[in-house]
Amino acid sequence: MTATYVYGLVAAGTRLPDGLTGLGPTGEVRTVEHDRLAAIVGDVPEDRPLGTRADLLAHEAVVDTVARETTVLPMRFPAVIDDTGLVDELMAPHQDQFLAVLAELEGAVQYTLRARYEQEVLLREVLEDDEEIRELDAQLRELPQDAGYNERIRLGELIVAALDERSAVDADDIEARLQPYAQRVSRSPAPQPDEVITAAFLVPRDQTAAFEEAVEKLGADTRDWLRLRLLGPLAPYDFVAGS
């Protein structure tokens, strides 16, 4: 029995883009069809465990390249199945479910946006806008470093609360500006205190240029205090449950 790597699923009859390179030793990427469904597959490394960062990047490169041209349901990395079970265990029993998801995603790609504050600028604005924080900060500046312990804790709590409030408002504003160009939006918890928003946008292909222009306009409007990072177009990872 031979192990098969599965990158994702597409409609039967889909032609893969030229130049795809898989993560296996041959680098081959092809499709295996069953009825109305096709799996994008390749071989797997035989001389080492699967799961390196290079493997992940190869997986993403395949599905993202396919996604630029056609609708793809990406599989979760790493997706390995015995070749005898590809049709009988994966494709045939779940064909209707997979085809329904492909229909929901038809004609759309994912963009992922991350927005991060310029910390010095933000803290300066917090001090300027909040009288209690400004006065407490001024008081502590007059004290030795080892004095005012409780006051310093209080100042930290006030700043964190102000940043959380500001971040919530800014995240909603960012989503509101970009949502008109997307079919769906999926927000994730910000992993860092200075990160305003991490959000995935499911964007119709005929709206990608407009979406990118809207992000550029957002970046220009917020360049003094916000740093944006846009990834895409990508496969719709955040809009496929359990893939």
Image: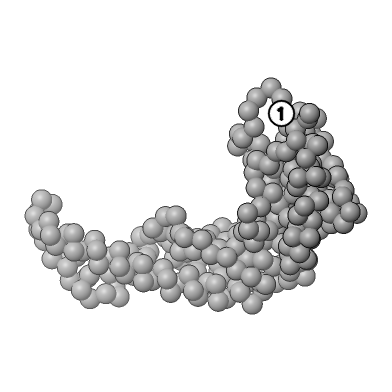
Residue in view at x 50 percent, y 75 percent: 173
Is 74 rendered above or below residue 27? below
Residue in view at x 65 percent, y 40 percent: 78
Does the image show residue 232? no
Does the image show residue 37? yes
The residue that disc 1 covers is: 45
**Left or right of 35 in this view: 133:** left
**Left or right of 34 in this view: 189:** left
Where residue 189 appears, as percent x and y from the top left, is 47, 60
Residue in view at x 79 percent, y 42 percent: 86
Kind of residue indicated by mark 1: Pro
Q: Quadrant of the N terminus?
A: top right
Determine crowd level at label 1: few under 14, some 14-19, many 20+ residues with C-alpha closer than 10 A: some
Where residue 128 appears, as percent x and y from the top left, is 29, 73
What residue occupies the far top of the structure in this picture? 47
Residue 104 falls in image quadrant: bottom right
